[in-house]
Image: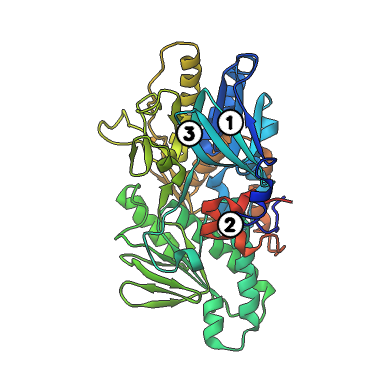
Amino acid sequence: MLSQSILRSAGHSVDRCEAEHRVELPHRADGRPRVVIVGAGFAGFHCARVLDRHLATSAEVILVNPSDHMVYSALLPDVVGGVVDPSSIATPLAASLRSTTVEVGAVSAVDTTAQSCTVSRTDGSELRLVWDRLILNPGSVTRTFGVTGVEEYAHGFKTIAEAIYLRERILRQLQLAASADDAHAREALSSFVVVGGGFTGLELAAQGHKLARAAFRQHRGLDPASVRWTVVEAEASVLGQFPAKLARRALERMRKSGIDVRLDSPVAEIGPDHVRLVSGETLATRTTVWTTGVAPAPLISTLGLGVEHGRLIVDDALQARDHPSVFAVGDAAAVPDLTRPGQLAAQTAQHAQRQGVTAARNVVASLENRESRAYRHRDLGFVVDLTGWNAIGTPLGIRLSGALAKLAGRAYHLFALPSGRLRVLSAWVNALFRGPQIVELGLIDERYATIPAEASGAAELERS
C-alpha cells in the first residue's frame, strides 16, 4: 500500500523529456463544463461526493489528490496506538466517486486568468487542466513558528505515513532502549516528547503511552519506570477550546496516567537527542512529535488573489472575492462565520465537511444560474479520547466526561466515517478485550514521515 521508494529529484531527466511528459486537457468537445477539485481532505472529499451525484451527466468532475484515498485523520491517534488498522480510515476515492475522474498527483500551479492548473503526476509527467470551476482544498502544512530543528528532527502528525511510522518508531525505540548499555542513551531512547497540548497532542500522547506500556512485557531488560512520555504546551492550559473545568479534568487524567504535561513551556530548540525549552531545561529524547499549529498550503498564496493569513478570502457562499469561478473550503479558505459576526469559521473537520457540501451545491447553482446559499454551521461539540474510559466532551453543548464522553465521541466517528465503519468498530471491540496490537512491521521509511515530506507531498506521491 505505502511505498518505500525514493522520490525522484525535481530535475531528473525533465529537460530531456519535457515535451513528451506534458499532457493538456482543454475544454471538452461536447461542451460540458469541467469542475476541478484540488485536494481530498474532509472538505474536498465531501464536495466531490455531492458533485459526483449532481453533475454525473451534466459536467465533468476531476478530483486531484496526492493519494488515491481520503484519510479520516481524526482517528490517526488510534493508528499510532495499534488499535485501528490504517486501511480502515482510508476511503478509496475511485470506488467512492463513480462518475468522477481521480488524478493522483499534486497541483503545482494555478493560472486564474487562463483558468487552468498544472498537476504533477506520480510518474513524473505533468497534466494541464483547463477548468470552468475550481474548488481549492489543498489542506495545510505544519507550522514550525521558526523553532530551530523542527523540520530536521521533529516528526509531524498529519498523514497515514506519519502515524504508521510513529507506531513503528515507538516499538523500535523500546527495543533499542532494552538493550542499551549507556544510561543516557537508554533515557533518550525510552523518552517521547509531544509538542502541543491541543486535541491531537493529548490523544497522540495518550495512545502512544498506552502502546508503550503494553509493549513492556516484550522487553524484559526495560524498566517500565524508565519509559517517559511528556507533553509540552506553551500556554498556561491545555485544550483552549474547552471549558476550563473540563480541560483541567483532562490534564489531571493525563498526569494520573503517568504522562508528564508541562504548561507554560515554549520550545526553543529541537535536536536529534533532546528538546530544549525556553526556560533552559533540556529533555532527553530521540523522538519528538510536533502537533502545534498549521498553516495553509503555500499554493494559495501563489494565486494572485486576496488572502488573509495565507487563506483565500471568500464570501459566505465560499466563492473567492476576486474570482467568480474559484471556490475555497477547509484550511485553504478564510470563511466568514455567520454565527459569530466578524470572525472566521474554525478550522475543524466539522466545518470542513459541511463547507464541502455547501461549496458543491453553490458550484451547481453557479453552473445552472441559480442563487447560491450562504454557509452557516454551529459546531456539534468536541470529544477528546484519552484511552480507556478517560474522555471529555461537549457534544451538542453538553459537558461530559468519562464513559459517556467516550461513547459520544465514538458514535460521532462511526457516523462521520465515509467507509470502514464495521472494521473500525470491530477494532475498537477487539482492543477493549485484547489490548493494542504490538508488532513492528518496518513499513515506513523515515524519509516519508518528516515534516518536509509532508509539506511537499512526498509522503504520498511515490508509491509502488
Pick the residue in front: 436 or 377. Answer: 377
The tag earlier along the polypeptide, 3 or 1, is: 3
- With 223 as the anchor, is 299 left or right in this view? left
**Amino acid type, residue under disc 3 in the picture:** Asp
Q: Nearer the viewer, residue 206 or 361?
A: 361
Q: Which residue is mark 2?
A: 162
Position of residue 354 in the picture relative to residue 100 (left or right): left
Estimate how packed mark 1 is, as few (under 14), some (14 to 19) or many (20 or more) residues with alpha carbons within 10 Å. many
* Image location (x, y in percent) of residue 26: 60, 25
Instruction: Kindly report the distance in space between the C-alpha atoms of the residues bearing marks 3 and 1.
Output: 10 Å
> Disc number at residue 111?
3
Label 1, label 2: how far apart the Cα atoms are: 31 Å
The quarter holding residue 195 reads bottom left
Of labels 1 and 2, earlier in sequence is 1
Q: Please name the residue shown 50% across and 68% down the image.
A: 153
124 shown above or below 272: above
Residue 154 rendering spot, x and y as whole percentages: 49, 65
Pick whichever, 285 or 108, lies toward us.
Answer: 108
Which residue type does callout 1 highlight? Leu
| Disc ID at residue 129 | 1
Q: Residue at x 67, y 72 (%)?
A: 217
- Say if residue 297 shows up in the picture: no
How many marks the image carries: the answer is: 3
C-beta proximity under 8 Å, tags 1 and 2: no
Q: Earlier in the sequence, mark 2 or mark 3?
A: 3
Gap between marks 2 and 3, in whole Å? 32 Å
What percent of the width, then of the height, locates residue 302?
Answer: 42, 42
Which SS class for mark 1?
A: strand
